[in-house]
Amino acid sequence: MDLHEVMSSLQQATDLDLLRLSTAIDHLLLSPSRILAVRQHLHLGQEVPFWNLHLNRMHHGRITKFKPEEVLMLTETPAQYWWVPYAAIQLDPNQAPPPPAPKAPSREEFARGDTVSFEGRDLIQRVGTIVRLNQKTATVSCDGTEWRVSFALLRHVIDL
């Protein structure tokens, strides 16, 4: 795709057409399936190149935190934090393979009253208390809402 041709075509578009195009692009970029396709190749501490929207150029940074629609990146020179959309990350699957998957926790590792965390389908991290242990899931109470969560998705929370 020739970016110069696209830009010259967009110069002739009406404001309403540009707004509709921008909205359509935003919906595509924020699609959960696109975000998950990128996120499955990422892990905390991984160094990746990304497009810095504020500086309008490529940077290298280390992933420090995940949000549903953004990643917090730490650049070294200068040391700065940037919230970056998943679409701005340039993936190279051969560069940094994800760390080996840890052994999935089993039912025996949890008890009623344990404080645990898990990531929901909406990619939001939740913290709660186990109120019931079932054969394959635990019922976790988070802010008055109960969630049935597979033991493989649960992580112990240690209060210091």
Image (cartoon, rainbow, N blue to C red):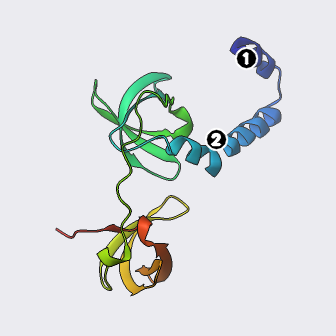
Is residue 2 toward the left or the right of residue 110 in the image? right
Residue 31 visible in the snapshot: no
- In the drawing, does residue 39 fall left or right of residue 74? right
Q: Nearer the viewer, residue 155 or 53?
A: 155
> Regarding mark 2 in the picture, which secondary structure is present there?
helix
Q: Nearer the viewer, residue 93 or 45?
A: 93
Quick one: label 1 or label 2, which is nearer the N terminus?
1
Residue at the limit of the structure toward the left, as seen here: 160
Q: Residues within 10 Å of mark 1 (few under 14, many from 20)?
A: few
Residue depicted at x 49% and y 81%:
145
Give coordinates of residue 51: x percent, y percent. Answer: 49, 27
Q: Residue at x 39, y 87 (%)?
A: 131
Asked if 156 appears above or below 100 in the picture, the reply is below
Residue 102, by quadrant, is bottom left
Looking at the image, how many numbered discs can be counted on the residues? 2
* Residue 9 rendering spot, x and y as whole percentages: 80, 18
Query: Image height check: is 148 above or below 101?
Result: below
Q: Residues within 10 Å of mark 2 (few under 14, many from 20)?
A: some
Q: Which mark is residue 1?
A: 1
Q: Is 21 rendered above or below residue 59?
A: below
Q: Amino acid at mark 1?
A: Met
Give the number of the disc on residue 29. Answer: 2
At mark 1, the secondary structure is loop
Q: Residue at x 37, y 71 (%)?
A: 106
What quarter of the picture does the N terminus occupy? Answer: top right
Query: Disc 1 vs disc 2: Cβ atoms closer than 8 Å?
Result: no
Which of 46/96 is in front?
96
In the rendered image, which quarter contains the C terminus? bottom left
Report the residue at 70% width, 38% height from top.
25
Which residue type carries mark 2? Answer: Leu
Q: CA distance from mark 1 to mark 2?
A: 18 Å
